[in-house]
Image (tube, rainbow, N blue to C red):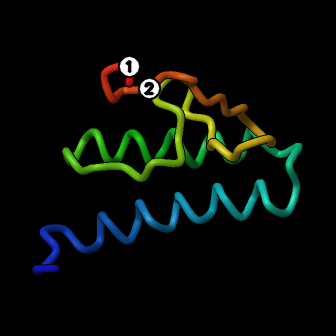
């Protein structure tokens, strides 16, 4: 990897992402605080035109942890042309 364009901004985004994860790991009922951290991360990333981590919902800013704050489904589709 080359030099990071805005290192402090990436550090701040990383901190907010990790804080949201830690809050939910300690207390799964504390989703409001994790959502606040994700919303703040989203706002900063959008303002600075930076890419966000994959852990937050684009719609409601919730931190997504399978079987805790979201559900996962797999499609039974085959993309090989039906063979």
| Quadrant in the picture for the C terminus | top left
For residue 62, side relative to residue 54 (left or right): right
Nearer to us in this view, 18 or 75? 75
Question: Relative to the observer, which residue lies in front, 40 or 71?
Answer: 71
User: How many numbered badges does the structure rendering display?
Assistant: 2
Residue bearing the label numbered 1: 82
77 up-or-down from 62: above or below: above
Q: Is 45 positioned to the left or the right of 63 in the image?
A: left
- Height in image: 59 above or below 65? above
Q: Which residue is drawn at 41% across and 41% down?
A: 42
Say which quadrant the N terminus sits in.
bottom left
Which secondary structure lies at badge 2? loop
Residue lying at 12% horizontally and 69% vertically, measured from the top left: 5
Marks 2, 1: nearer the viewer? 1
**Which mark, by number, is residue 78?**
2
Lateral position of residue 64 relative to residue 46, left or right = right
Mark 1 Cα-neighbour bin, 10 Å: few <14, some 14–19, many ≥20:
few
The answer to the question of whether label 2 and label 1 lie on touching residues, with beta carbons closer than 8 A, is yes
Secondary structure beneath disc 1? loop
Nearest the eye: 70 or 61 = 70
Q: Residue at x 48, y 44 (%)?
A: 40
Estimate the x, y position of residue 6 in percent, counting from the top left: 18, 68
Classify residue 62 as left or right of residue 43: right
How far apart in space, not on screen, are marks 2 and 1 (Cα)?
A: 6 Å
Where residue 67 sits, quadrant-wise, is: top right
Whether residue 19 is situated above or below residue 31 in the rendered picture: below
Q: Where is residue 9 in the image (x, y as percent from the top left)?
A: 30, 64
Q: Where is residue 44 in the image (x, y as percent from the top left)?
A: 34, 47
Image location (x, y in percent) of residue 21 = 66, 59
């Amino acid at each position: 990897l080359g030099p990071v364009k805005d290192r402090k901004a990436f550090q701040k985004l990383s901190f907010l992402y990790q804080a949201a994860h830690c809050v939910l790991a300690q207390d799964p009922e504390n989703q409001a605080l994790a959502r606040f951290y994700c919303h703040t991360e989203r706002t900063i990333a959008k303002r600075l035109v930076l890419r966000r981590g994959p852990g937050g919902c684009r719609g409601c800013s919730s931190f997504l942890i399978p079987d805790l704050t979201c559900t996962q489904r797999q499609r039974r589709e085959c993309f090989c042309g039906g063979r």
